[in-house]
Structures are given as structure tokens and as C-alpha cells.
Image: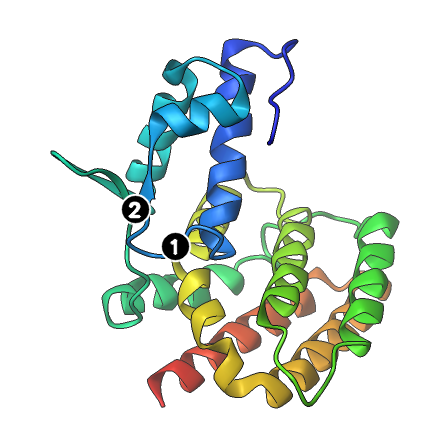
Amino acid sequence: MTTVPDNLTARERIDTIHHLLRERICLLEYAPLSVLRESQLAHEFRCSRTPVREAIKRLEFEGLVTSKNGVGTIVTEANFELLQDVYAMRLAIAQLIGDMGVATVPKELVSGLHRLLAQAKILPKETGQALVLAKINHQLHGLICEIISNTALLQLYDLYYYQTSRVWYQQMPKFWASEVEALEAELTELIVAAQHNDVMALGHIKRNYIARVIGLLQG
């Protein structure tokens, strides 16, 4: 059971529940077309149904859930054909990171990239642990968000990631061996760019990785 701290403000409580639910949807803990029930979530988080309802409204605005009369709140499908325009926007936005990024790459980001690379290197090449790889990639997304200094760009970059990532995480097992290698290569490139404080290169590397994923999904 996940407990939301009692000392949070009403807004912080909604933010926390929204974040937790969005993470679960992104990492397929809540599979597409599964039903979310306010009463069960309120019981889990040990809160009233009001903050849960508000968090779900945010998820609905983001396109991650939909409400149906007589059924409840349903996690939306993760379909590449329906999200091709969003993927195209992710490509365009990634290229803007260099122009709207931080002046200096934080040392904590470099150490975080090294930590993720160490995790990627011990992933088995012969068997699929797609959720583990997805979690590494998910943490990588969080690190990249830290170098985006423009608030509007950050909000779009984050939103489009959550809207599309499930599509890729569902298909990832088909490309397991190559994806382990690709993740290691991407992290290695990002580390070099970060160590040289090259935010422009960081954006281009992410853009190239997104383009690679799109190519695999289209194939």
C-alpha cells in the first residue's frame, strides 16, 4: 500500500497522486484498457476520493485515461498509429533542448548518467527484462528534464514522453538484444556530451534516439 504523507497541502497531495498514477501507466503497471477505481485508489493512498478524482482529471487532460459512463476510468490504448503526430513533436522538441537548456550541466546529472549506464551494462543480452530497461529509460527521461530551463518546453517534453512511451515499452521485448546495446550506446554518448557541457549535443542525441524508435515502430 502506498501512503501519501498527511502533512501535504491539498495541491501537493493531488500532485503526488497524479505523479504516482502517471508513473504506473507509463511503466505499464496499469495496462491499456485497465480500469482505475477511485474508491480503491483512495483506500490505497489513505485519502478522500477528492484528490484522487482531481489527479484523474489531469490524466484525462493528458490523454492517458478516459471516463466512460457505467464503466469508470479506463487507461487509454497505446497505439503508434494514433500517436504519430505526437512522436513527430517529440523529434522537434528534442532539437530545441540545446537552445533552451541550462548554461551548465549539473554534476549530479553526469553521475546519474553513469549510474544508469552501470545498470544497463548488467542487463542480460539473451533474455527479456523489458520493465527493467523501461525503468532505466524512464529515469533517463527525468535526468534530461533537468537540463531544460524553459518551462513551456519542459512541460511539452514531459507530456509527450508520457503520451508515447507506453507504445515503445510494449514493443521493446521484440528488439531486446539490440535495445540493450542501443541504451548503452546512448548513455555513453550522453555522458561524453554532458562532461563537455554540450547541451546542444545532448538534445541531438535524444532526438536521434527518438528517431530510431520511430523507425523501429514503423517497420
Looking at this view, is 132 or 35 the one in front? Answer: 35
Determine the secondary structure under disc 2: loop
Q: Residues within 10 Å of mark 1 (few under 14, many from 20)?
A: many
Q: Residues within 10 Å of mark 2 (few under 14, many from 20)?
A: some
Residue at image point 58% right, 72% down: 130
Residue at image point 68% right, 63% down: 136
The color scheme shown is rainbow
In the figure, 100 relative to 77: above or below?
Answer: above
Looking at this view, is 39 or 62 the one in front? Answer: 39
Q: Check whether the beta carbons of the residues at disc 2 and disc 1 lie within 8 A of each other.
A: yes
Residue on which the image places disc 1? 163
Instruction: Work out how far the residue at label 2 is from the one at label 1, CA to CA, in angstroms.
Output: 7 Å
Residue on which the image places disc 2? 63
Which callout, 2 or 1, points at the residue further toward the start of the chain?
2
What amino acid is at disc 2?
Gly
In the figure, 215 relative to 164: above or below?
Answer: below
The answer to whether residue 7 of the structure is visible from this angle is: yes
Where is the N terminus found, in terms of image quarters? top right
